[in-house]
Image: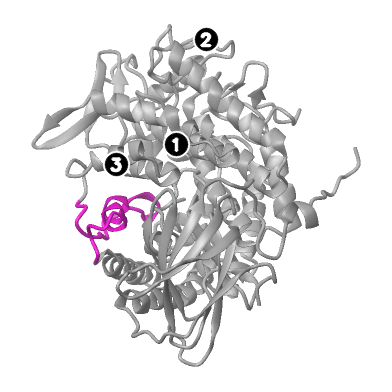
Amino acid sequence: MVAQSISVIESEERWAPPEWALLERALIEILNRSAPEFAARYTRSDGTLVWREEWPGMDGSDDPYEGFQNFPLFYVLGGSEEVQQLSRKIWDSITWQWTEYGQIHREFDAYYDWMHHGEGYLFLFFLGLADPTVLKDRQRTVRFARFYTGDDPDAPNYDAGKRLMRSPINGSRGPRFEMSAEDWSTHRGVLDNYPPPFEDIPGVPGPLCPWTDDSVYAQILQRMNERMSRGDIPLNLTATSMITHAYLYTRDDGYRSRVREYLDAWRARTERNGGIIPDNVGLSGEIGEYMHGKWWGGYYGWRWPHGLHTIIEPLLIAGSNAALLDGDVRHLDLGRSQIDLLWGLGREENGRWVVPHKHRDAGWTDYRPMNPLYPVYCWTISLEEEDLQRAERMRGHGGEDWGRATTRVGKGLIGNSGPWFEFIRGRNPKYPEQILRANLQLVYEQLERMRSDQGDPADWDIHHWQERTPVILEGLVQLTLGVPMHIYHGGLLHAPVRYYDADLKRPGLPPGVAALVEGVDAQTVTLTLVNLDAQSRREVVIQAGSFAEHSFRKVTRLNKEGKEPPGLPLDGPWVGVGLSPGAGVRLRLGVERYARRPSYETPWVSPEREHGWLIRGRG
């Protein structure tokens, strides 16, 4: 049963099972079997990966985490306890294994950039959602956050006086001001398929750059160390996710201040640069300090092969984190400004609006459709009209078909933000069935790849596991939580609701229960719960926000015609729903957004109150 202070609504109304509910539960059950099979195929009994004896360079510790990072998130949605236990064993084992390889130090990547840190440490963020009472996770998180707040003398990545990260390459060993040939050794073959990182490499005009040519490689390293290894870049804003993660365990306002301070520093730099965010700032705080005054050309910046992608994402990640901690969605303004800037620089080509993704010495270039995730994600955080209009103007101009779900997905097996937006705006009522069928098809395809895998594991590529994982969650996240997937390169999962099993006192939907968020706006969330179990009553706790940051003010049970009778007043982040065997209910929840301090508390546990201490070793 739920805590006594939580109101419980009972439903005994029998429902014919909707197709989406049957597909949702079918997907959950298939994933419950597929995740252990995937772990058994690629890990030993102790959780370490079946792979090679050594691994040089700085690339790669993120990749094994990526292969298994959806395990704890699946548990948060309603996956089995076995999957949760596997996720903890595998996280610990990968951390040990890559420590032995020499890449992880103090349980954190010794040094790399925050695109890769962000990808890998999603695993840790999801462990916090799955069970915030694990002391070693809390202790690790506090230690990791201190690498980026200026409070750890052994990892002085952050200059609090200048409000800047001291290098694009950073980690538990601090800033890395000089990169070696070994650092990039394992990645050279992949980088042969990318444009040159500089415009003045002798004999390399592009469009590709032969990193595997030793003479070219030497020229690249020389220029990287002269121009890119010192100072700050926008990508470092992703470090605010680790700092926010620490706040969610501790509610220490020092973390909140640091997130806001660092985001404000980048806002000020953008204003100094005429409204365009610069992609490189020297150790003195000067824009273009090592780039001959150019505001473009930095590491993972406007000229880097990813261009816009690795500029906008960190702005949205940091803005969302600050909005969560402060309850003020104006923290999204820096990301909004760059979306609007690029849209204004766009042009029409073949009936679509394309925007520049890169800036070279000759000016803006690489015109392509903007990823619809960016404005859609802004809107899901703020639910304000201005962000809705940014998302709406994307319709018909993106690179994907917004009319139906697709299996043609990208990194992290994510690719349906546009079609989900159409559904949540009431324009694609068949989307739930579409995305669940698409996800089921992908799971079967991934299982086939896994089961037919051949060859010596020592020869496998570092991306082997993430390319074969069958734990595909986009449809479950979108439909049950009412949001698109998180930003893959280090974004926290911000959602209007999440669920707990009241009887087992654990996260996720109870066995046999399916959920569908049908509508979200600034004041309400409309959702349906169905109990497909014909024998057992189930009790669900709905939480207002991923981190209990919102508060419910009213709940109304809607009838089948959608009419809204008088509701039940509420005042808190949780409401319980009891579902008799075969029963369903459609609810409209009145929400006050950002009414509470966010944390990893659950209906039964307050982490900072019950597990607020740390083990302190000898000095």
| Number of the front mark, 3 or 1 | 3
Count neighbours of disc 1 (C-alpha within 10 A) and say few if under 14, some if 14 to 19, many if 20 or more: many
User: Which residue is painted at 60% across and 61% down in the image?
Assistant: 130
Residue 72 in sight: no
Q: Where is 118 relative to 604, above or below?
A: above
Q: Where is 424 relative to 515, above or below?
A: above
Q: Residue furthest right?
A: 618
Task: Mark 2 or mark 1: name the one nearer the start of the chain.
Answer: 2
Q: Is residue 354 left or right of residue 89?
A: left
Per the image, label 1 sits on a secondary structure element best described as: helix
Report if residue 406 lies within the magenta region: yes
Task: Mark 3 or mark 2: name the one nearer the start of the chain.
Answer: 2
Q: Main secondary structure of the magenta part?
A: loop
**Badge 3 vs badge 2, beta-carbon distance below 8 Å:** no
Residue 45's spot in the image, x, y percent?
62, 71
Residue 187's spot in the image, x, y percent?
44, 39
Query: In the drawing, what numbered circle is on residue 286?
Result: 2
Q: Quadrant of residue 327?
A: top right
Per the image, label 2 sits on a secondary structure element best described as: loop
User: Which residue is painted at 36% across and 74% down in the image?
Assistant: 559
Location of mark 1 (residue): 316
Please, what is the three-letter code of the amino acid marked with disc 3?
A: Ala
Please, what is the three-letter code of the amino acid marked with disc 2?
A: Glu
Location of mark 3 (residue): 391
Per the image, label 3 sits on a secondary structure element best described as: helix
| Number of the front mark, 3 or 2 | 3
Count neighbours of disc 2 (C-alpha within 10 A) and say few if under 14, some if 14 to 19, many if 20 or more: some
Q: Which residues are magenta?
A: 401-429
Q: Quadrant of residue 396?
A: top left
